[in-house]
Image (cartoon, grey):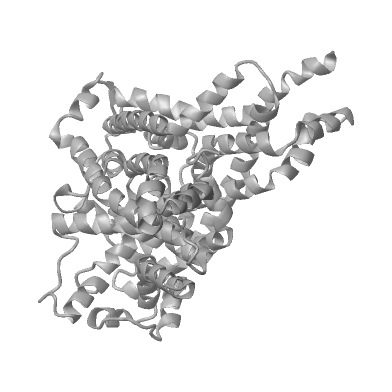
Amino acid sequence: MSTRSRTVTATVTIALLSIVALLPFYIMVVMGTYRNEDLFTKIVLFPGNYLVENFKTVAASRFDLAYWNSFIVSAVSTVLSVFVSALAGFAFAKYNFRHKSKIFGAVLLTMMIPGQLGLVAYVIEMRYLNLSDTLMPLILPWVANAFGVYWMTQFIRGAVPAEVIESARIDGCSDLGIFFRIVMAFIYPAVTTLSLLVFLWSWNNYLLPLIVINKPEMYTIPLGITTLGSAYRTDLAAQILGLSIGTLPVLVLFAIGSKSFIRGLTAGSVKG
Amino acid sequence: MMDAMKRRWVPYLFLSPYMLFYVAFGLIPILFSFYVSLTSWDGIGKKTFVGLDNYAFLFNPDSYFFTSVGNTLLFVAVSLPLQMAFGLAIAALLYSKFVKWKAFFQLVNFLPYIVTPVAVGLMFNLLFDWQAGFVNKLLLEFGLIEEGIYWLGEPLYARIVIVLMLFWKGFGYTMIFYLAGLANISKDLHEAAAVDGATGMKAFWTITLPLLRPVTTFVAITGIIGGFQLLEEPMLLLGGAGMGSASAVIGGPERCCLTTVWNMYDTAFGSTTRYGLGSAIAYGLCVIIAVFSFIGTKFYREES
C-alpha cells in the first residue's frame, strides 16, 4: 500500500470509530429541535424546526439561575483550591522543615480516601453551621485538595529555580512576596491544568448538592437538568434541549484546554 | 539570626490554610462519620450507641451491601475490558503516523468522559426509552423487533444498557493513558524491531503491548476504584426524568443496578434516614476500595 492510501484508510477507520463517541451527542442535539409529539411518532435523524420554541420553554424554567450558581461554585472553588494548593506546594517543594516527608506522605494518603467516607457527617456539620441551602457546602471540600498539593509540589520542585528564589531573598523580598511575584509566574501551566480539573469536578458534582440544596433558586446545573423533567414532564424535547445547553459550556471549555487538562489527568501514571 | 528564627515558621504558615480546611471539612467529618456508624440515628432524634451492629447488618442481605458491591464489580468487569480494548485501538491508530487531524479525533473521543455524569444518565435514558427512544425506533425501522423493547424495565437489559453507557463514557479515558504510554516508548525500539523484521501488527503484539503493561495495570486499578464510586449514571438512567419518580425504582428493576454509593445515599438521605447504617456502608466501601488499592499497588510496583 502506498503511504497515501494508508493515510486515507487509517483516517477513515478512526473517523468511523469516532462515530461511537459522537452519535449520542448528535441524537441529543437533534432531538432538542423537534416538537415533543414528533419524538414519539417518527425517527429523527436531521435537525427539525422547533428549536426556538423549546428554547423558550427551557428559559422559562430559570435555567439561567442554575447556570449562575454553578459558575459561582466552580469559579470560587477553583480559585481557592489553586491558591491553597500552590501555597502548600511551595512549602513542600522549597523549604526544609521538621516532619516534612511525614506530612507530605499523609497528604498523599488522603488522596486515596474516597470522598464519600465522611459524607454523612459533613452534611450534619453543614446543617449545624446553618449552611444548608447555601452554596458554601459545595465549595468548602475543594479548598483542601490533596491532588492539587501533590501536583503543585511536583511542578514547583521542577519549574522554579532555587537561584531565583535566593537572589530575590537577598534583594529583601519577603517569603510571601516571593510566592506571589516569583513562584506564581513560573507555575502558570500547572495553574491552568489544576484550574481546569477543579472546575470540571465541581461543575459535575451531583451527590452533594442533591443532599444539601433544597431550594430551587440555589440549584446548580446537574440539579437543574434533572428537575427540568419534573417541571415539564410531558415536554421531553425541552428537557433534551436543556441537557444540551447544560452540557455545552464544559465541552467548549475543555475543547480549548484539552491539552493541559489531559496532562493533569495522566500525571503520575506513566513515570516521569 | 532573627531572620532564620522567623523563617522556620514560614513553611508551616504556608501549609496552614490547607491543614485548617482539611481538618475542618475533611478529617472531622471522617472521624465523626465513624462515630455515627456506631450509633442508630435519624439525624434529628437521640443517638443510640449500638456498637458494631450496623457493620454486622452489612452482612444481612436486607442491607443490599454485598448485592451493590457485586453489581458494581459486575459492571466494571464487563465494561472495563471493552473500554480498554477500544481505547487502546484508538490510541494505537492515533499514534500511527498515518492518521490526519490527530488532535481533533483525540478530542472527539475524549468528550464523553467530561460530560456531566447526570447528563450521561439522562441521555441514555432517552436513547433507550421504550416509546420515544432512538434505539427502539431504529430497531423497529429495520424490522429487527416487532415492538419496542422495555430496556430499562428488565434486569438483564438494564444491565446491558449500563455497561454500554459506562463503555461509551470511559473509553476516551483509557485512550489518553494509552496515548501517554505510547509516547513514552522509545522510537529506537521500533526501528530496531523493524530491522529484525517485526513491523505492523507483529511489532504491536510483541513489543508495544508488553511495554504498555504498566499503563494497562494502572488503568485497570483506577477503573476498578473509580467504578466503586459509580452513582449518577445508573441513578438517572433508571430514575428517569425528574427525581420525583426515582424513589420508586431504587437500584432499577429488582435492584439489579444498585451501586454501593447509591445504596449509601438511599439509606441515609433517600427512602430512609438511617445515618448510622449509611456511615457504616461508607466505611465498608472504603475498606473494599483499600483492599483493591493495596492489591493494585502491589501489582503496579512489580510491573514497573
- Quarter-wise, where is residue B241 in the image? bottom left
Q: Position of residue A131 (x, y in %)?
A: 49, 41
Horizontal side of residue A155 vs A225, given as left or right: right
Q: Is residue A271 above or below residue B141?
A: above
Q: Position of residue A264 (x, y in %)?
A: 54, 46
Q: Dividing the image into 4 quarters, which one contains the N terminus of chain B?
A: top right
Q: Is residue B127 above or below residue A220?
A: below
Q: Dividing the image into 4 quarters, which one contains the C terminus of chain B?
A: top left
The residue at the far left in this view is: B146
The residue at the far right in this view is: A171
- Quarter-wise, where is residue B166 in the image? bottom left
Horizontal side of residue B139 vs B190, given as left or right: left
Q: Please state which of residues A245 and B141 is positioned toward the viewer in this rendering.
A: B141
Number of marks in picture? 0
Q: Visible in this render: residue B202?
A: yes
Q: Position of residue B189 (x, y in %)?
A: 49, 47
Q: Visible in this render: residue A216?
A: no
Query: Residue at coordinates 40% horizontally, 86% vertically from top-left?
Result: A49
The residue at the far bottom in this view is: A49
Q: Position of residue A227 (x, y in %)?
A: 37, 61
Q: Please state which of residues B286 and B58 is positioned toward the viewer in this rendering.
A: B286
Q: Please state which of residues A76 and B275 is positioned toward the viewer in this rendering.
A: A76
Horizontal side of residue B110 vs B224, given as left or right: right
Q: Is residue B38 above or below residue B235?
A: above
Query: Residue at coordinates 17% horizontally, 29% vertically from top-left?
Result: B59
The residue at the far front in this view is: B196
